[in-house]
Amino acid sequence: MKKLIALSVMAISFNALADGHEALFKTLDADANQMLSAEEAQIHEQLAQQFSQLDVNKDNQLSLDEFRALQK
């Protein structure tokens, strides 16, 4: 029973974290094009500092998947 409760809490926490990433991404995406530009990233200090490392495909934009790596 304790394992089931622990797994449930972990699942809820993971979903909340994923939802938080998406909510922050949408907030930062000023032009609502589902990508973050380097300019949009300037609002978030940590994101601005790591933008080039997170931009895996080097298209000068971050997708939601690339953005999620910010917290890893």
Image (cartoon, rainbow, N blue to C red):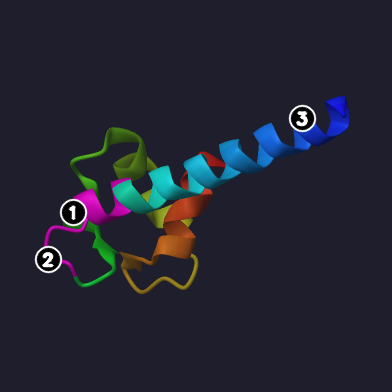
Q: Which residue is mark 3?
A: 6
Q: CA distance from mark 2 to mark 1?
A: 9 Å
Q: Quick check: marks 3 and 2 in contact, CB under 8 Å?
A: no
Q: Residue 21: say if magenta.
A: no
Q: Which quadrant of the structure image shows residue 59?
A: bottom left
| Three-letter amino acid code of the residue under disc 2 | Asp
Single out the residue that lies furthest toward the top.
2
Write the start and end of the magenta stretch as one range: 24-32
At 25% from the left and 56% from the top, the residue drawn is 26
Which of the pair 53/24 is nearer the observer? 24
User: Is any part of residue 26 visible from this angle?
Assistant: yes
The label nearer to you, 3 versus 2, is 3
Please provide percent x and percent y for residue 67.
42, 55
Q: Which residue is mark 1?
A: 40
Please provide percent x and percent y for residue 48.
30, 44
Quarter of the image with the C terminus in it? top right
Q: Which residue is mark 2?
A: 31
Label 2 neighbourhood size at 10 Å, few (<14), some (14-19), many (20+)?
few
User: Is any part of residue 55 visible from this angle?
Assistant: no
Q: Quick check: marks 2 and 1 in contact, CB under 8 Å?
A: yes
Quarter of the image with the N terminus in it? top right
The label nearer to you, 2 versus 1, is 2
Disc 3 or 1, which lies upstream in sequence?
3
> Is 70 above or below relative to 55?
above
Element marked by disc 2? loop
| Three-letter amino acid code of the residue under disc 1 | Glu
Q: Residue 27: say if magenta.
A: yes
